[in-house]
C-alpha cells in the first residue's frame, strides 16, 4: 500500500509512531555516547586520579593518595591492564573510563597525577580522548613524555624482554611522535636530575607546562626516580599545586618532612 493511498488518520498515526521511534533512538544514542554525563567545573576541585608507571605498581602512589584523601579530596589509584606493561592506548582507555565514572558520580572536575609512564598515559589521553575538556589540571612525576633511552636500549638488547609499553616508550616510537605540548591544560611536570630510569631526565619537559626539575627548586637534594612519588618534598609540591585555584610555579622548596 502506498503512502498516498492511506487515509489522513492513518498517515498521522504512522507519523506519530515514526517520531516516537526516532526519539527513542536519540535517547539510546545519548546513553551510549562515551564521556561525562555532566559539565566539568574546572573552577572546582574534585576527584584526583593517580596513574601508576610501567609495571602498574599501585603501592608506590598510595602514600600520595592517602595524603590527598587526608586533605578532603577523593583519590583513586588506577589498576592498569597487563600490570602496566601492555599497550599504553589500552591504559588510556582505563583512565578515560575512570574520569567519566568520577564525573558521572558527581565530581565537579578531575585532576590527574601521572607517575613515570603514567604521565605518558595522561598525555595520550589528553590528545586522544578530549582530556583537556575533562580535566582540571595534570601533574606528572618523572614522566618520559618524549621517551626514555633505557627503553630503547632494552628493546635493542633483548626485544623479547621488552613488552609493548617498553617498546612504546622508546624515543621516536610511533605512539610518542604526535605528543606536543600541554594542550592549553594547566600542567606541572616535576622530575629529578638524579633519574637513571627516565633518561635523559628532562624528557619530562613539556611545552606549555610548568617544567620543574626538583633540584632547581631544592638545590643539592638527591632523589631517585623510584623515590619521586614518596618523597615528602614532592608530595608537598603536588598537594600545593592541587590546592591552587590557578596553577603557578612554586616559590620555594618545601622543608624536608613536610607533606
Image: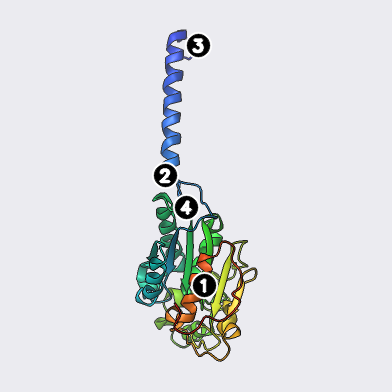
Mark positioned earlier in the residue sequence (2 or 1)? 2
Residue in view at x 48 percent, y 65 percent: 112
In the depicted structure, whether residue 179 falls above or below residue 193: above
Q: Nearer the viewer, mark 4 or mark 3?
A: 4
Find disc 3 in the rendering and name its residue: 4
Q: How many labels sit on residues?
A: 4
Mark positioned earlier in the residue sequence (3 or 2)? 3
Q: How dense is the environment of label 3, judged by Cα within 10 Å: few (below 14), some, or many (20 and up)?
A: few
Q: CA distance from mark 2 to mark 1?
A: 31 Å
In-front residue for pair 189/93: 189
Q: CA distance from mark 1 to mark 4?
A: 21 Å
* Quadrant (top left/top right/bottom left/bottom right) for the N terminus: top left
Residue 32 - label: 2
Q: Residue 58's x, y, as percent? A: 36, 73
Residue in view at x 43 percent, y 36 percent: 27
Q: How dense is the environment of label 1, judged by Cα within 10 Å: few (below 14), some, or many (20 and up)?
A: many
Q: CA distance from mark 1 to mark 3?
A: 66 Å
Q: Nearer the viewer, mark 1 or mark 4?
A: 4
Find disc 4 in the rendering and name its residue: 108
Residue 140 - label: 1
* Quadrant (top left/top right/bottom left/bottom right) for the C terminus: bottom left
Label 3 secondary element? loop
Q: CA distance from mark 4 to mark 2?
A: 21 Å
Amino acid at each position: 500500500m502506498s503512502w498516498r493511498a492511506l487515509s489522513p488518520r492513518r498517515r498521522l498515526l504512522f507519523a506519530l509512531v515514526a517520531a516516537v521511534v526516532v526519539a527513542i533512538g536519540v535517547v539510546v544514542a545519548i546513553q551510549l555516547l562515551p564521556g561525562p554525563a555532566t559539565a566539568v567545573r574546572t573552577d572546582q576541585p574534585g576527584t584526583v586520579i593517580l596513574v601508576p608507571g610501567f609495571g602498574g605498581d599501585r603501592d608506590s602512589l598510595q602514600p600520595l593518595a592517602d595524603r590527598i584523601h587526608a586533605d578532603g579530596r577523593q583519590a583513586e589509584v588506577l589498576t592498569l591492564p597487563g600490570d602496566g606493561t601492555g599497550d599504553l592506548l589500552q591504559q588510556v582507555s582505563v583512565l578515560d573510563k575512570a574520569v567519566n565514572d568520577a564525573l558521572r558520580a558527581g565530581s565537579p572536575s578531575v585532576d590527574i597525577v601521572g607517575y613515570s609512564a603514567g604521565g605518558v598515559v595522561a598525555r595520550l589521553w589528553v590528545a586522544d580522548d578530549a582530556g583537556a575538556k575533562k580535566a582540571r589540571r595534570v601533574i606528572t612525576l618523572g614522566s618520559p613524555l618524549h621517551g626514555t633511552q633505557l627503553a630503547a636500549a632494552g628493546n635493542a638488547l633483548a626485544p623479547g624482554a621488552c613488552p609493548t609499553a617498553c617498546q612504546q616508550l622508546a624515543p621516536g616510537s610511533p605512539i610518542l611522535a604526535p605528543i606536543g605540548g600541554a594542550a592549553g591544560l594547566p600542567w606541572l611536570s616535576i622530575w629529578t636530575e638524579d633519574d637513571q630510569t627516565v633518561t635523559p631526565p628532562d624528557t619530562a619537559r613539556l611545552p606549555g607546562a610548568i617544567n620543574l626539575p626538583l633540584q632547581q627548586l631544592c638545590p643539592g637534594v638527591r632523589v631517585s626516580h623510584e623515590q619521586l612519588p614518596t618523597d615528602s618534598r614532592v608530595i608537598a609540591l603536588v598537594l600545593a599545586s592541587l590546592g591552587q585555584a590557578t596553577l603557578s610555579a612554586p616559590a620555594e622548596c618545601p622543608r624536608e618532612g613536610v607533606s
